[in-house]
Structure formats: structure tokens, C-alpha cells
Image (cartoon, rainbow, N blue to C red):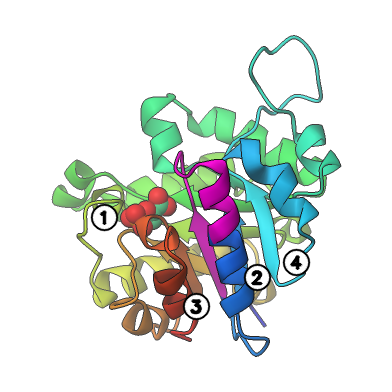
Amino acid sequence: MRKKIVAGNWKMNLGKQEADQLFDGISQQLSKESKADVMVFPPAIYLDRLVQKNDPTITIGIQNFYPKEKGAYTGEISVAQVRNIGATHVLIGHSERRAYFQESNVLLKEKVDAALEHDLTVVFCCGEPLMIREMNQEMTFVRMQLEESLFHLESAQLQKCIIAYEPVWAIGTGKTASVEQAEEMHAAIRSWILEKYDANTANAISILYGGSCNAANAQELFACPNVDGGLIGGAALEVESFIQIIQSF
Ligand code: PEP
């Protein structure tokens, strides 16, 4: 049975006190009966202090890391270090990393392998830019992203991954994918996993939607049969909207 998940990507936002307030607010308002697993991806500089809060209801992950064990990579954070401070999840393949930091499918594959080797759970982002959707090439494009970075894994490894479909044209734009567009892509991703692996694997993997998901549209998106939750950017920066999204299940 795949998990329902709501994950907040805080990106490069919030001061130390604001990060504390947001985390504590979510922690206090999160119902014990929450139907969804809740994750946050704060800026790396706050990871340790948030992990130290020891809240078992909120999973903490890092937004980025370098796929080497250790060494002369000034400014980078290794997977071993992420694991060592007690974070358990990693975001890989976010469109902002692909666009602004030229992260290729090849590098992302390396990151996926490094994360799994250190027993970190991968939240793997995929999604097409607007130009690709306008050419009706979104299926081919997203499939290629998955083929080149994720589908080399064995079934057991893939089952340690969560996929987030995030159409680039919907991220931070206020323009959400329609329920039909989201469900169509999520169903396609699940069918590719079925085709390459098996029904067990296809049914075990949570596929999240991301792209201007908010308290007003989460309920209809999460009601889609193949949408298992959301990766939330802007609306994850306020306790109230993030909690409302979690309660949309
Ligand atoms: C994201 O960056 O993963 C995201 C979905 O952002 P937003 O919700 O702001 O569109």
C-alpha cells in the first residue's frame, strides 16, 4: 500500500528563527491522526537544529548534496554527512537544480545511487518545461528523465524512492496543472514502472504532484487515483496553508 505524503520544500527561504517557528508551528498543529506522512526540506544550514527537535511526526530531508563520500569539494555536503546528522531523505532532480546548476540526468543518477547506498530515501523530481508541453512531448520527456536517472535501479531500490511530478511551468507560477493533466502523467509514470518492473513495484511507489499546489486546490489533486500527495513550495512556508494541505486527505 503506497503512502500518502505531503512534503514542504523551503528552498532558500527563512531566517533561523523563522525556520524554527515554521517547524514548531507545523509540529504543534499536526494532528496525531494525520492521514499523510509529513516531510520538510529546509535549507541545509538548519537541518541539524531541526533534527535535534526530535519530532517523530515530521521527516527531515536535505534539498541537495554532493554524491561523494568526502574530500576536497569545497562548499559541498556529502551524503555521509547528511546521514550522520540524522536526516533521512534527499530531494534529487528538482527543476531549479536542473536549470540553475546544470544538473544532468547522468549526475542525478549518480546522486540517486549515492543516496541509496547511504540508506537515504530519495524524492526524485521530474517534469517538463512549458516548451516541451506546448510541443506535446511531455510524456517522452518525463519518461527519459526517469529512464536515465532512476529506472536502472532494482525493484527493491526503486521502492525506496518517491517520485514527484512537477511540471516546470507550474512551479512558483500560480499556474497549477489541471486534475486531468496531473492524473494523466501520474498514471503514465505508474504504467512505465509496471512495464519495466511489476505490479507490486508500481503499486508501492508514491507519486507526488508539485507545482503551485495550495490549500485551495490540494483536495481535488489528491483525490486523483494516482496522485499520492504533494511536494509543496510557496504554500509550505506558512503553517496554516501547509497544515490545510495536509488535511486535504
Ligand atoms: C517546488 O518547488 O517543488 C514547488 C512545487 O514550488 P511551488 O509549490 O511554489 O510551485
Quadrant of res 121: bottom right
Q: Which residues are magenta?
A: 5-21
- Location of mark 1 (residue): 170
Most distant residue in the left direction: 134
Q: Nearer the viewer, mark 1 or mark 4?
A: 4
- In the picture as drawn, the residue positioned furthest to the front comes out as 17
To which residue does mark 3 refer?
A: 246
Of the residues shown, which amino acid type is indicated by label 1? Ala
Contact between marks 3 and 1 (CB within 8 A): the answer is no
- Mark 1 vs ligand 1: CB below 8 Å: yes
Of helix, strand and loop, which one carries label 2? loop
Q: Vertical placement of 138 versus 245: above or below? A: above
Pointers 3 and 2 in contact (C-beta within 8 Å): no
Is residue 107 in the magenta section?
no
Q: Nearer the viewer, residue 220 or 117?
A: 220
Q: Look at mark 4 in the image and give the residue it sits on.
A: 55
On residue 198, the disc is 2
Give the Cα distance between marks 2 and 4.
Answer: 35 Å
Residue at the right extreme? 84
Of the residues under marks 3 and 1, which one precedes in the sequence? 1
Give the mark nearer the N terminus: 2 vs 1: 1
Of residue 105 and residue 173, the one placed in the foreground of this image is 173
Question: Is residue 14 shown in magenta?
Answer: yes
Closest to the camera, between mark 2 and mark 1, is 1
Say what amino acid the circle numbered 3 marks: Ile
Q: Is residue 31 left or right of residue 102?
A: right
Marks 2 and 4, the one that precedes in the sequence: 4
Mark 3 element type: helix
Question: What type is the residue that disc 4 sits on?
Answer: Asp
Residue found 19% across the figure and 53% down from its top: 136
